Every structure is written in structure tokens, then in C-alpha cells.
Image (cartoon, rainbow, N blue to C red):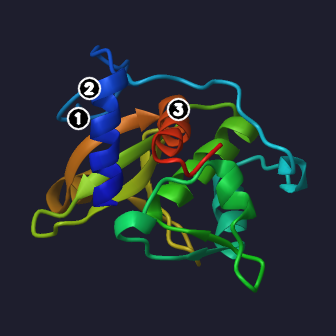
Amino acid sequence: MKNIIIGLIIITGFFVTACELEYIPGMPQADYDIEIGNIYDYDFEGSEEIPEFETIEEILRWFGKNSEYVYETGKNDYMQTPEETFYRRNSENKMMVDCEDKVIMIQYLIKKNLGIQSYLVTIKRPASKDYHAMLYVNNLYYEIPIKSNFIIPLEKLRNDFKIYDYIPYSEVLWMTVNYHDAVGKYR
């Protein structure tokens, strides 16, 4: 995850125009606010195989049953597009993901099925060197374990983690596609 953050910072140096993001009411202010780029209309061939959902909880349950966490480090750690996540499978036919891949795929499903905005939240434990990605939607923070889902109260999150940024789905997707273009892993 650290390499992804560094890669995104490098990309922002080339492509970013600084401006304030529009935060939804009640969202805590992040340490820095940048808008990178946006992709609003995204879909992929084969996505019709994914069931339709009516709630975030249905999405989380389906995703939990159909994915397996794979810890990625170093050169192997990069953000997968929803298409890559959907097609990167193990021998049990489960999607292979790490924390940011989970959030990005769930953001895609939320946008496609519910049409609402969601955010990838980058956090870090004070004593840790590792960054972690969580989902923020409808004023709730979601930790997305594979077998279940948890809603994290903001007070606990503020006490246990340093919150770095909130990135809307359209920007996360843009970064994912362009990050892959930059390192030659996508397209």
C-alpha cells in the first residue's frame, strides 16, 4: 500500500491541479485536498455477470463470499481496476484483492447499483508504517473484512488512526487507470 501511495503522489506531481474537494456534510476535513481527475462512466465487458444489489449491505455480503484477501507488497502492490479485480481469480474462483482493491470494487458496485457517491479513505495507525484503505459512504466508515462487514465509529477511527484523505470514486478510478498506464500494468 505504501508503494501505491508513493505512486499516486508521483502521478499527482504530473497531473494534478490543486483545488478543494466538495465534502459532504459531516465529513471530517482531511490533511490535504486535491482533485486529480475523474472518470464518470466506467463499465467493463462481463460485468453483467455480477448480480444487481439494492443495499450496501448486500454488496458487502456478496463481495465477502466471492473474494479472498491477498497481501501485496513492493512491486506487486498496485491498485486494480474493478475489471482486473473481477477477473483476477484463485483456484476457488474467488476474486483476489487487498484493501484498496476491495474498496475500489465495492465503490464500483455502489455507483453502478445505487448511484451514490462513496469515498476511499486512506488511514494509518500511528505506530505502523503501513497505510490502509477503508470505505466511506452515507456518513459511515466501513472496514471490509472478507467474511463479514463492520461499521467503524468515527470516534474510534480518530483515536486509532490518522486519516489522510477522502477520494471520491470517480477520482479513485481515474488514478487506478492512469497509475496502471504509468507503470505499464493496465491497457
Q: Are the residues tagged 1 and 2 within 8 Å (C-beta)? A: yes
Residue drawn 32% across the image and 15% down it? 17
Question: Seen in the image, is 66 located left or right of residue 151?
Answer: right
Q: Nearer the viewer, residue 148 or 130?
A: 130
Q: Earlier in the sequence, mark 3 or mark 2?
A: 2
Where is mark 2, residue-wise? 33
137 shown above or below 128: above
**Picture quadrant where residue 165 is located:** top left
Left or right of 57: which side holds 73? left
Q: CA distance from mark 3 to mark 1?
A: 20 Å
Decide if residue 107 is on the left or right side of residue 50.
left
Q: Residues within 10 Å of mark 1 (few under 14, many from 20)?
A: some
Q: Quadrant of residue 19?
A: top left
Camera-side residue of 140 and 29 = 29
Q: Amino acid at mark 2?
A: Asp
- Residue 83 % position (x, y): 71, 51
- Between circles 3 and 1, the one closer to the viewer is 3
Q: Which residue is mark 1?
A: 30
Query: Which residue is the extreme one toward the front?
Result: 184
- Are there few (<14), some (14-19), or many (20+) residues within 10 Å of tag 3? some
